[in-house]
Amino acid sequence: MRRDIFQALADPTRRAIILLLAVQSMTPNTIAEEFHISRQAVSKHIKVMSECELLSQEQKGREIYYHLQTDKMKEIEKWLEQFKELIATRFEQLDQVLFQLKQKKK
Amino acid sequence: MRRDIFQALADPTRRAIILLLAVQSMTPNTIAEEFHISRQAVSKHIKVMSECELLSQEQKGREIYYHLQTDKMKEIEKWLEQFKELIATRFEQLDQVLFQLKQKKK
DNA sequence: AAAACTTGCAACCAATCGGTTTCATTTATA
DNA sequence: TATAAATGAAACCGATTGGTTGCAAGTTTT
């Protein structure tokens, strides 16, 4: 079961959990209170995010605090950068084409 | 069937198609040549991306050229910005806490 | 020691996903 | 005009998803 941060972001509930944990590390119970789904459903979302190393856990007595691994989000940014670079080169190519057309005119 | 650009990005094949189309608009057939899946499978990926308005089509005879709507990608960036802002405020809060601790010491 | 709390895991379920094969339609070409 | 090409849509399939309920295990609290 290959996990991927893009998959982690695909679900709206998980995105909301990420934003929650971006502000403050929390336990599954307190996270679940924010949504209208069961504690176990939240637990499954946490599992998905843990599997792609987006979350780390810290046991404190019988509670577990989940921390967001903010660095992992850079993978998204990295992909977006790659994308933007391609767009940029596309425009460079277009510029080149337009320049050549201009030359021909002369 | 609510579509979402985050869903569009969730599949690795679709991400590859996006990068392809970022360079150059293409027809389903030419896209399919790049992958080891059927043309129809590519067609389904295109459908998903069209449904969230990430692609637009341009009919040219019996061919259809698919164009990437690059603006749509900004929704991802927008969400990422929101995320980064929360992280920033978290550090501000941390700074505040550290400052208060320092004051107490005095 | 017993009861309560916090959690993860397994079993189950309907819906969706990513792929296939088959077919119908439209457009270009022989 | 018959044939070939390009595409989308539908039916089907096994795997995965996002949810549920029930349960077991560890930790506090009484």
Image (spheres, coloured by chain):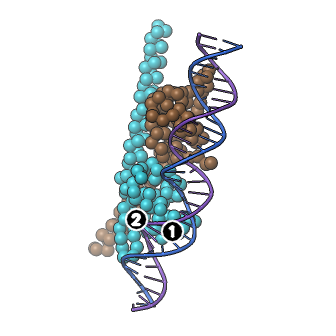
Chain colours: A brown, B cyan, C blue, D purple
Quadrant assignment, res B93 = top left
**Mark 1 residue element:** helix
CA separation in Å, label 1 and label 2:
14 Å
Q: Is residue A89 or residue D11 the one in the foreground?
A: D11
Quadrant assignment, res B67 = bottom left
Q: Position of residue A37 (x, y in %)?
A: 48, 35
Q: Chain of mark 2?
A: B
- Which residue position is annotated with label 2? B66
What residue lies at 36% left-to-right and 73% top-to-bottom?
A: B60
What residue lies at 53% left-to-right and 32% top-to-bottom?
A: A39
Q: Position of residue B47 (x, y in %)?
A: 43, 61
Closer to the chain start, of discs 1 and 2, is: 1
Q: Chain of mark 1?
A: B
- In the rendered image of this protein, does residue D3 appear above or below residue D11? below
- Which residue position is annotated with label 1? B39
Kind of residue at badge 2: Tyr
Q: Is residue A11 visible?
A: yes
- Give the number of the mark in front: 1 or 2: 1
